[in-house]
């Protein structure tokens, strides 16, 4: 079911004239070309587009993993373009959660241990870590699988563990890169239900996807091609 909760009027991200170029052997590649974009706090946004169109570059920018060649990317009043490395590390540790297509779970660790690993950068005491891990696994419906290792879980359950790991640090934003790409349709819908519930609780959700069925469930749909963003929400 698609959410109808209106987004906040506050702004999570503001991108102004963002360009990103790379040197590739003897040529310059422009991954982003003067992007102007605002994403409201609490929104659910999907990003689609052709391979090589700039989606990964944009997601890295939003995740404070890369800086623009020109322009500004503001999150939590911090401009990623000019922030210190320490500031960017803080943003990634405290404000941004990441979920990937490949789950990225440690196979020898249980669900509890995998989620707990995500809290290492926050330097929390043991009691607070335990509380957050338990709460996160409960929120994604896996409290009864806490002691299971990835190999003992379905693909959908593994992705839910990855989501729990991301939200246990209580971020403002969750960035998901093809989070349903390795799942069948029923598991895809299971994961989308979890993500929509987290969004309904106020988490800003930004998902890169090739799957139009995923994109249709978002409140706002963007298309990124040749480094240019277009809003196709009503298209």
Image (cartoon, grey):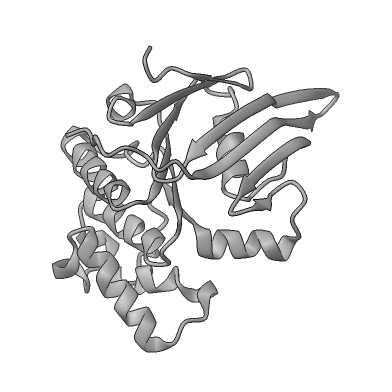
Quadrant of image for the N terminus: top left
* Whether residue 156 is situated above or below residue 89 in the rendered picture: above
Image quadrant in which you'd find residue 151: bottom left
Image quadrant in which you'd find residue 73: top right
**Outermost bottom residue:** 126
Viewer-proximal residue among 112 and 139: 139
**Outermost front residue:** 9
The spot of residue 142 in percent (x, y) is 19, 63
The spot of residue 113 in percent (x, y) is 35, 74
Q: Residue at image x 44%, y 41%?
A: 9
Asked if residue 41 can be seen in this view, the reply is yes
The spot of residue 209 in percent (x, y) is 40, 31
Query: Image check: 1 left or right of 160?
Result: left
Asked if residue 102 can be seen in this view, the reply is no
Image quadrant in which you'd find residue 72: top right
* Whether residue 122 is situated above or below residue 77 in the rendered picture: below
Q: How many marks?
A: 0
The spot of residue 8 in percent (x, y) is 40, 43
Viewer-proximal residue among 140 and 148: 140
* Whether residue 90 is situated above or below residue 82 in the rendered picture: below
Query: Image check: 137 left or right of 64?
Result: left
Q: Residue at image x 26%, y 70%?
A: 135
Quadrant of image for the C terminus: top left
């Amino acid at each position: 079911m698609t959410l109808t909760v209106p987004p906040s009027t506050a702004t999570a991200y503001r991108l102004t004239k963002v360009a990103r170029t790379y040197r590739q052997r003897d040529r310059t590649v422009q991954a982003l070309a003067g992007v102007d974009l605002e994403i409201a706090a609490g929104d659910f946004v999907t990003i689609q587009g052709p391979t090589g169109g700039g989606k990964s570059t944009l997601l890295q920018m939003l995740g404070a993993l890369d800086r623009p060649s020109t322009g500004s990317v503001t999150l939590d009043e911090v401009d990623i373009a000019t922030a210190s490395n320490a500031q960017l590390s803080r943003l990634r540790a405290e404000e941004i959660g990441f979920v990937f297509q490949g789950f990225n779970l440690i196979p020898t660790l249980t669900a509890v241990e995998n989620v707990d690993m995500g809290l290492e950068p926050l330097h929390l005491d043991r009691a607070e870590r335990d509380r957050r891990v338990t709460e996160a696994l409960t929120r994604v419906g896996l409290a009864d699988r806490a002691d299971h290792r990835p190999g003992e879980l379905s693909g959908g359950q593994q992705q839910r563990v990855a989501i729990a790991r991301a939200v246990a640090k209580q971020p403002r934003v969750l960035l998901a890169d093809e989070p349903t790409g390795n799942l069948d349709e029923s598991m895809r819908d299971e994961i989308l239900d979890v993500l929509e519930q987290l969004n309904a609780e106020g988490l800003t959700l930004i998902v890169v996807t090739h799957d139009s069925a995923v994109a249709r469930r978002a409140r706002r749909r963007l298309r990124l091609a040749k480094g240019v963003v277009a809003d196709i929400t009503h298209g």
